[in-house]
Amino acid sequence: MYNVMSPRAEEFISDEEIQSSLSYAEQNKNNREVIERILEKASEMKGISHKEAITLLDCEIEDLNERIYQLAEAIKQEFYGNRVVMFAPLYLSNYCINGCKYCPYHLKNKNITRKKLTQEDIVREVTALQDMGHKRLALEAGEDPVNNPIEYILESIRTIYSIKHKNGAIRRVNINIAATTVDNYRLLKEAGIGTYILFQETYHKESYLELHPTGPKHDYDYHTTAMDRAMEGGIDDVGVGVLFGLDKYRYEFAGLLMHAEHLEAAFGVGPHTISVPRLRNADDIDADSFTNGIDDDTFAKIVACIRIAVPYTGMIISTRESQKVRERVLHLGISQISGGSRTSVGGYYEPEPEDEKSEQFDVSDTRSLDEVVRWLMEMDYIPSFCTACYREGRTGDRFMSLCKSGQIQNCCHPNALMTLKEYLMDYASPETKTIGDKLIEREVLNVPNEKARAVVTENLRYIEQDNRRDFRF
């Protein structure tokens, strides 16, 4: 039985409800009246249900599909403007005791080089990341209670926050580790993490159990209720996602939105971010052997329909996707991207030797952070290195209320400009700096509040002339 408030995974991710929603969407994919009614509701920019969203995703009426894309773009502009938050992943360890069939870190893989960063290694890697200009990291580690216990993760977080190289600092550490206990989530919260991220991989329980035949991750219910425990542990910024390509994309899309609806209903705040990774080749994993891959057109429509369904939620796309694909979906809803990424354990301080490869997946966008920043600015986006909301306590429902009220423009827009200015002064190539300075000069005028605009203008001068850093609203 479907129950959005239930603490049981099989009730808030109800197979019966998903199948019913998919059937409804199939029956109405060419029903102009139904789809126009959904678009009318969606145009209020307050979100729509999973059933309504899957109906938009299935829509086959050409002019209405065009309206879907236009609405997604309008919603993205309304709440996130032209800001794009930058981050990088840092893999701490690829030791793992799970048997996931799509991940090269699985226990039976004897080909991949197993690595784990020491705290000294982390200092070198983070210093290199700071020297690139990064301020926000997503920590990744395989599930292995011996090699990667919670104590190791906590120590690594402390080490990362302690590193201050030249003008550099990592100001927000997000965490992507296996489902754990309420007590461990409390420890992560106390350590000062930003967002706790965990991909469901697939919401289809039968497929999930088949794809995770061994290891603790085999427990579908424990994995699926991880965000509930994170919330109970005090972490109110959580990030969800599925790995598109493992199961049928329509089922995953519905399950993903139902998970968001559950968190909103049960805890008063939905996910802070939604990620949309697609399956990629890696070491002993051949993505082509999976039969549920999706093409770029379908991927773009998924992004657009998620943005319409959850207007206030950040959306993340990584370097799994090519420059061309990333460019296509940025205006449809994406608000965070990685740049200059490595999916190996470490790899920023120095490249891995060819015979010691440890990547989790092949990177499609191999450009440097400076190249990605310049590319964004050439399209009139503002690359943002801001972490202010997290450090000012604007998390969970407090961030969402800021977003819903429209006041985000008076916080996030100025913060984006000031952190971009820091990047331009400390790390950018001359060409990137020239483009960025002109962009900032134009965008300062778009800060809505006159007093805020004056403060930003003054702070930008302090950053450039006095070498002062870390201003924030």
Image (cartoon, rainbow, N blue to C red):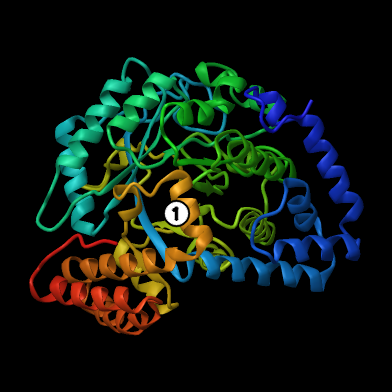
* Residue 293 horizontal side relative to residue 353, left or right: right
Relative depth, front residue between 44 and 10: 44
Above or below residue 316? Residue 181 is above
* Residue 143 horizontal side relative to residue 314, left or right: left
Q: Locate residue 441, reporting x and y percent.
A: 30, 83
Q: Identify the residue at horizontal 18%, vertical 56% (top origin).
A: 131
Q: Identify the residue at horizontal 23%, vertical 59% (top origin).
A: 133
Question: The N terminus appears in which quarter of the rendering?
Answer: top right
User: What's the residue type where badge 1 is placed?
Assistant: Thr
Q: Quadrant of residue 346?
A: top left
Q: Identify the residue at horizontal 36%, vertical 58% (top origin).
A: 86
Residue designated by label 1: 319
- Dot 1 falls on a residue whose secondary structure is loop
Q: Quadrant of residue 90?
A: top left
Q: Residue furthest front?
A: 451
Q: Identify the residue at horizontal 13%, vertical 73% (top origin).
A: 462
Residue 247 is at least partly visible in this image = yes
Q: Locate residue 406, reporting x and y percent.
A: 49, 65
